[in-house]
Amino acid sequence: MELSLASACADEIRDKVRAGARLSREDGRWLLTEAPVLEVGAMAEELRHARLPGRVVTFVIDSNPNYTNVCITDCQFCAFYRKPGDPEAWTLTVDEVLGKIESAASKGATTVLLQGGHNPALPLDYYLTLVRETRRRFPQVTPHFFTASEIQTIAGLNRLGIGDVLDLLREAGQRTLPGGGAEVLSERVRTRIAPKKGGPQAWLEVHREAHRRGFKSTATMMYGHVEQADDLLDHFDAIRSLQDEFGGFTAFVPWSFKPGNTLLEKWIKHYQGPNTYLRMLAVSRLYLDNFPHVQASWFSEGKKAGQIALHFGADDWGGTLFEENVHAAADYVNHVGVDEIVTLIREAGFTPAQRTTEYDILKKY
């Protein structure tokens, strides 16, 4: 009887997906908690190829430096930050940050994802100068700078509205935002692991105002800590609804929490495994019917998991990440170069293609 019921649920969802119908919250809960993972993966792979014909898998040449580790927000999942005055706290000058961008550009990077802590000592002009000078000195590089919580911090410290900060960044030359800092967009989860960041609306407000102004951004999810299935569905529903408004999200990017050296480590000692990751990717492809791309995070999950992810609904490999410090602070490090990315994508049975920040293809291999 249980097998028959599972088969009936799978058939019903498969029919909905093939008809282009939106999945319900009940569908999502079954996919997250009860559906056989290979069944979910097969549905996601079928949908991925229906929406994106051909076997192209994209990647971006990028780097992910940080401008400061000083932060006053005390997120329990973060091993990177240091409080103001800590002996290990640091903040780079504008020229030092631009030196990192120059290094990335010299290696062929077309995107630099710049983020840092919430540092109350930094003036508004610091952020605007970083954007202006990146555009001026490295016109081939997209400044993919500052997460939603950083923009919230800039606005609060300068007594500006979120829209005002985004207008200033746009005037300086910025057109895209990274999706970091979402964690899980659930009131319960954010109150538990990042109470000073505010609830889901704090993150959503920034992306809504950005999309209203023509910015493109990604939506992320960091799972594998205190969330339950309904928290994940809150997250999916929130970003799917926002995407209905403006279509400003280019991709969904999930990754698993790394507990090393964090305040949550005493309660959560193990990484979520590849089965959970593959299920998350597949469910996101099926549930987020208005997201064009789903990104496989080789960096956080491992290269082999990244290859398998391409058969579970993902169509993008992410980036080269010439520099990354946040996962490294949690004792989790992966490295990959362009040649290896191309090889890994080909080994998985796909055609590699370099893309821009906004997913325009620059070159097929």
Image (cartoon, helix red, strand yellow):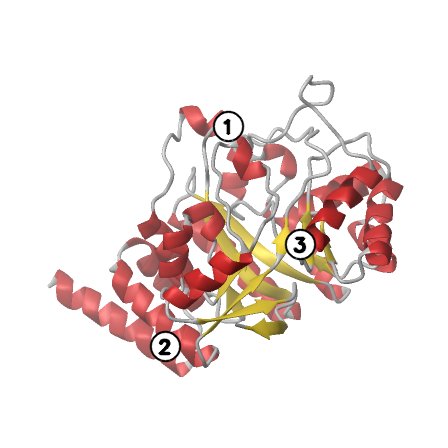
Q: Mark 3: give few (<14), some (14-19) or many (20+) Cα within 10 Å.
A: few
Percent position of residue 178, x then y? 65, 53
Per the rendering, the mark at residue 262 is 1
Residue under circle 2? 16
Please state which of residues 313 and 310 is positioned toward the viewer in this rendering: 310
Badge 2 density bin: few <14, some 14–19, many ≥20, Cα 10 Å: some
Could you tell which of marks 2 and 3 lies nearer the N-terminus? 2
User: Mark 2 or mark 1: which is in front?
Assistant: 1
**Dot placed on the residue nearer the N-terminal end, 1 or 3:** 3
Q: Residue at x 36, y 75 (%)?
A: 46
Q: Between disc 2 and disc 1, whose residue precedes? A: 2
Secondary structure of the residue carrying tag 2 is helix
Is residue 99 found left or right of 270 in the rendered image?
right
Q: Which residue is drawn at 61% across and 69% down?
A: 359
Whether residue 23 is situated above or below residue 118 in the rendered picture: below
- For the residues labelled 2 and 3, the Cα–Cα distance comes to 45 Å
Do the CB atoms of the residues marked 1 and 3 lie less than 8 Å apart? no
Nearer the observer, 319 or 76: 319
Residue 244's image quarter? bottom right
Q: Nearer the viewer, residue 41 or 299?
A: 299
- Marks 2 and 1 sit apart, C-alpha to C-alpha, by 41 Å
Viewer-side label of 2, 3 = 3
Q: Is residue 351 left or right of residue 80?
A: left
> Could you tell me which secondary element the residue under label 1 belongs to?
loop
- State the CA–CA distance, disc 1 to disc 3: 32 Å
Q: Which disc number belongs to residue 107?
A: 3
